[in-house]
């Protein structure tokens, strides 16, 4: 492919006043490119939806002492935890801020909750909102419209969300302001000598973020003589790029499809490193700011670790099959006619009871939009048991994924490698989800109220204390609004099942029947909440969640004590069937294939209220 011949085409005007087409991308060192393109106070987007994250460029920003940045990124991830902790940021524009599959971003939380190392202003969105902001920026439009944020508290605290009325139908729609970064930085697999860039795999919003920006820096694994076509690949022509820097391994600990694999161990170890300010400072000095280190390198992030790091998140509570004390899946059962003695039920954990029943809830579904953690475990188990034809859809852009192991994050390379198709994040949310093409949305939550409304944003920790920060909305608001129905799966604790949410991130049934219809939400909303104690379903008349089934060995009193509102019981309260030996074998094999550390964990509300230090 040769795009340099298109150089005389008119294009945007660069910051130096020269039209694109007269100023091709230069092959530069990373140090020189960052020094020239990124300045104090800039709005900088370092994009890559869990794949191709430009860690090396972020570390060079830290080494050069650039500060006062507005950092934009759909999923801040560990890379922004590092930038925030290093004091580079004053504001964050984002839609989900967590350590994928592990738990919290502790440097992010410390900045928001305690102002360390400096206060951090937030501009918070959903994934659909952020994707559309980039798309509007790329199109040089002032804003984008979507059916989003309905019933959510997000617009109440985010000035870049508004409501507009369609001039043709009268429908009220969400409008989000265009996002035009001063600088976009991405990592890609390769470039040619003319500065044309090629990337493939999960492409997230990289193309939109590049085309929305005033200046563009791309780090690549290698320079190739020619860019051979790749199915589903993206080529960014040299005349939209300012500089290309060759940085092999520059995405580590994330990955570059075809060149490296995701370093899941680093993401697990990061939890212990970032949890403590002093430990983080030591890591930063040794692996990023280290005296004498080549400023063009990636900072040897893969060598980082923490002595005694457990890899478990204090927020998520783990996700291992061994959580809790195993118990026989026996106890109160439906009356049956006398017959031959049944084989004893297999011994299983409360989590396994929950996961098996969550998988059963997908029997007969055609397509499922899958959240990470417990929803992903249940959906992948359903494919191996009750619904082998289930089409799994992940918000990273994969349609029809068939992973052989549980992904630690929605950007796991196996999701793309085993998918029927891989699309961009804007396409996923606008065409597939908003277009009403998904049967079931499967979500987790930190807090749920009696009407199935969800909080994944922040919790009130009491008078004179800052609110406790949660990851944020991610894709949940639009998943819950647009899927045919929604299933929730989470552990049943009083801090998670609350009488009133501290923040409504995602609307379930609002305040009762009719609220969804009044807001123009096409889906049925939450139809079941599956926990480690039983199953709750909305009452058909009131839309309030009621207890409809207990898991074997659980009493209704246990469930009531773990619920923050006066929980009602269905007149025909049942007991779920215990997992079969085949179901447990399939579940345990799936988890075993995930490797050390077990499957990803579920998000929960903070239990201690301690700060992030």
Image (cartoon, rainbow, N blue to C red):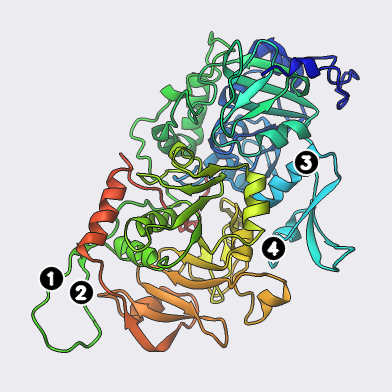
Label tally: 4
Determine whether the residue tagged by mark 3 lies in a helix, strand or loop: loop
| Disc sitting over residue 153 in the figure | 4
Element assignment for label 2: loop
- Label 1 crowding class (10 Å Cα cut-off): few <14, some 14-19, many 20+? few
Residues tagged 1 and 3 counted as in contact (Cβ below 8 A): no
Residue that extends furthest to the bottom in the rendered view of this protein: 571
Of callouts 2 and 4, which one flags the residue occurring earlier in the amino acid sequence? 4
Mark 1 lies on a secondary structure that is loop
In the picture provided, is 49 more to the left or to the right than 520? left
Provide the residue designation for mark 3. Answer: 179
Q: Disc 1 vs disc 2: Cβ atoms closer than 8 Å?
A: yes
Q: Tell me if residue 450 can be seen.
A: yes
Q: Is residue 397 left or right of residue 135?
A: left
| Residue mark closest to the camera, 4 vs 3 | 3
Q: Give the residue at mark 1.
A: 344
Residue at 35% across / 71% down in the picture?
533
Tag shown at residue 330: 2
Q: N-terminal of the two: label 1 or label 3?
A: 3
Please provide percent x and percent y for residue 275. 47, 40
State if disc 4 and disc 2 touch (CB < 8 Å). no
Inter-mark Cα distance, 2 to 3: 55 Å
Q: Specify which label sits upstream in the sequence, 1 or 2.
A: 2
Q: Give the side of residue 275 with respect to residue 232, left or right.
A: left
Mark 1 vs mark 3, CA separation in Å: 60 Å
> Nearer the observer, disc 1 or disc 2?
1
Give the camera-side residue of 378 and 331.
378
Q: Nearer the viewer, residue 279 or 46?
A: 46
First along the sequence among labels 2 and 3: 3
Report if residue 325 is visible in the image: no
* Mark 4 and mark 3: Cα distance apart in space: 21 Å
């Amino acid at each position: 492919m040769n795009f340099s011949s298109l150089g005389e085409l008119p294009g945007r005007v660069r910051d130096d006043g020269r039209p694109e087409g007269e100023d091709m991308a230069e092959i530069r060192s990373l140090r020189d490119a960052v020094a020239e393109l990124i300045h104090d106070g800039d709005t900088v987007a370092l994009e890559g939806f869990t794949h191709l994250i430009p860690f090396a460029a972020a570390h060079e920003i830290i080494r050069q002492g650039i500060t006062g940045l507005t950092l934009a990124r759909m999923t801040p991830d560990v890379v922004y935890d590092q930038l925030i902790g290093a004091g580079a940021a004053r504001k964050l524009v984002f839609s989900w801020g967590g350590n994928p599959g592990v738990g919290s971003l502790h440097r992010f939380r410390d900045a928001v909750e305690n102002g360390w190392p400096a206060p951090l202003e937030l501009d918070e969105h959903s994934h659909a909102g952020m994707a559309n902001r980039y798309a509007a920026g790329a199109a040089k439009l002032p804003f984008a419209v979507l059916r989003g944020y309905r019933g959510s508290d997000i617009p109440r605290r985010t000035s870049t969300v508004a409501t507009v009325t369609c001039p043709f139908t009268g429908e009220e729609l969400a409008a989000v302001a265009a996002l035009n970064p001063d600088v976009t930085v991405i990592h890609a697999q390769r470039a040619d000598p003319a500065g044309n860039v090629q990337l493939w795999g999960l492409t997230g919003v990289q193309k939109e973020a590049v085309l929305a920006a005033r200046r563009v820096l791309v780090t690549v694994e290698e320079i190739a003589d020619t860019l051979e076509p790749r199915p589903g690949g993206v080529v960014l022509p040299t005349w939209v790029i300012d500089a290309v820097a060759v940085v092999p391994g520059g995405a580590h600990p994330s990955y570059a499809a075809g060149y490296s694999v995701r370093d899941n161990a680093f993401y697990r170890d990061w939890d212990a490193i970032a949890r403590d300010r002093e430990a983080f400072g030591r890591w930063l000095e040794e692996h990023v700011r280290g005296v004498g280190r080549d400023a063009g390198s990636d900072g040897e992030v893969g060598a980082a670790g923490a002595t005694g790091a457990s890899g478990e998140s204090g927020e998520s509570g783990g996700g291992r099959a061994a959580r809790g004390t195993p118990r026989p899946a026996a106890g109160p059962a439906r009356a049956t006619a006398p017959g031959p003695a049944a084989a004893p039920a297999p011994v299983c954990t409360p989590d396994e009871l929950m996961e098996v029943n969550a998988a059963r809830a997908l029997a007969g579904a055609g397509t499922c939009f899958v959240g990470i953690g417990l929803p992903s475990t249940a959906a992948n188990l359903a494919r191996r048991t009750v619904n082998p034809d289930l089409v799994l859809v992940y918000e990273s852009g994969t349609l029809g994924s068939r992973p052989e192991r549980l992904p630690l994050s929605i950007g796991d390379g196996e999701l793309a490698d085993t998918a029927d198709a891989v699309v961009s994040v804007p396409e996923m949310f606008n065409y597939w989800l908003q277009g009403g093409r998904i049967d079931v949305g499967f979500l987790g939550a930190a807090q749920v109220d009696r009407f199935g409304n969800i909080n994944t944003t922040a919790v009130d920790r009491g008078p004179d204390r800052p609110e406790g920060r949660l990851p944020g909305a991610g894709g949940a608001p639009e998943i819950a609004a647009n899927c045919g129905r929604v299933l929730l799966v989470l552990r049943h604790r009083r801090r998670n099942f609350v009488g009133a949410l501290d923040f409504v991130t995602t609307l379930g049934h609002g305040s009762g029947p009719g609220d969804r219809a009044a807001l123009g939400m096409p889906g049925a909303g939450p139809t079941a909440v599956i926990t480690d104690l039983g199953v709750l379903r909305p009452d058909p008349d009131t839309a309030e969640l009621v207890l409809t089934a207990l898991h074997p060995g659980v009493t209704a009193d246990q469930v009531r004590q773990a619920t923050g509102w006066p929980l009602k019981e269905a007149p025909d309260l049942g007991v779920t069937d215990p997992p079969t030996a085949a179901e447990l074998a399939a579940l345990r094999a799936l988890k075993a294939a995930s490797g050390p550390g077990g499957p990803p964990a579920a998000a929960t509300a903070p239990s201690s209220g301690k700060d992030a230090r």
